[in-house]
Image (cartoon, rainbow, N blue to C red):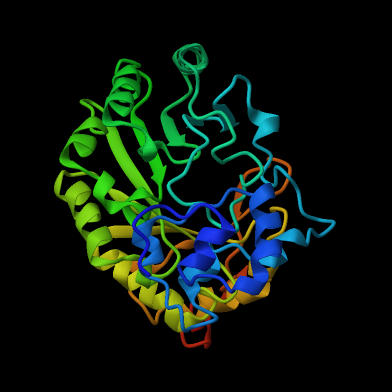
Amino acid sequence: MPASRTLRSAAQLIEHGLAPPEQLAALDAVARRYAVALPPALAALIDQHDPNDPIARQFVPAAAELDTRPEELSDPIGDDAHSPVAGIVHRYPDRVLLKLTHVCAVYCRFCFRREMVGPDKPNVLSPEALAAALDYVRTHQDIWEVILTGGDPLVLSARRLRETMKALEAIDHVKVVRIHTRVPIADPARITPELVRAIKIKGKATYVALHVNHARELSLEARGAIARMADAGIPLLAQTVLLAGVNDNAETLGCLMRCLVECRIKPYYLHHGDLAPGTSHLRTDIATGQALMREIHGRWSGLCQPTYVLDIPGGHGKSPIGPNYLESKDEAYSVEDFNGRRHAYPPRA
């Protein structure tokens, strides 16, 4: 039975054939700990006859989420250590995160903020907290970029988004506003012309970074929402999380990257899975990610190459962890090409 509303409980998932009835108790336990929301647009993409469906694996809760490993952390990338005021994370010198809401259109089963988001958390920053966050941005002249995140900022109304964007427009030293979102994938109908107008502001570059992990997420409706932003002149980037059983082979990953570029989206980051609680069944090892990056290097266009990164636990930021193609010895170099052959640089006479 197709879903006509967002599914938010184990019973609703079972009713719509997206989880087996015998898992009701286990999935209820997962839902009590971590938020569940599966909107109709994504539910419709799930192949109910495939027990390993890559869309279901990302969004339908699993009993494995109750298994927490010793190395997993409630705040795996260290947001709290770099939050000087509510709603702000200031980890890097020239940019801040501004977390407007803790609500998402869909809750990913691997989310690194899974302990912080959900309908039982504060819905949006209070007017007082938002004012204090904007004051922080105003008084720190080194902030060149503000990244709206959450939760998902595009679950907010066009009016509320417009007010925040106008406030940022008035801050001279802020030159770039980046919006991180899954809404064009999870609820494409929300990307209306009014919302697109609300996130464009004069004198600043507005970027939208979409979270997409599998080519099947780019439905016709999602592509339409993406086109509405691209046609309005908004540059689009993509962030992808490397996930076991979802995109951890070269064909699947390469297909996703090509589909993104065809949609006028530049692949930006391929994230190694964070050490969020109950997500070990979805993480790969770093060697797998490096091998995948080697496979897509040279095989697919340079436009299709994301940077493979690890967010270092404890709040130390992202570092690239892709394969190394360069070796040095005695002031000379050996460089590996995309076929795996090595070459001296400078070339020997």
Indicate left or right for 194 with 165 as reference.
left
| The quadrant where residue 323 appears | bottom right
Indicate left or right for 290 with 178 as reference.
right
Q: Name the residue: 30% across, 58% down.
A: 265
Give whichever of 185, 81 is nearer the camera: 185
Residue 13, visible in the rendered structure: yes
Q: Name the residue: 36% across, 49% down.
A: 183
Indicate left or right for 81 with 42 as reference.
right
Give whichever of 329, 185 is nearer the camera: 185
Residue 326, visible in the rendered structure: no
Tell me residue 22's x, y (percent).
66, 73
Give whichever of 171, 187 is nearer the camera: 187
Tell me residue 224's x, y (percent).
20, 57
Tell me residue 258's x, y (percent).
32, 72
- Residue 349 vs 42, above or below: the answer is below
Extreme residue in the right direction: 70
| The quadrant where residue 282 appears | bottom right
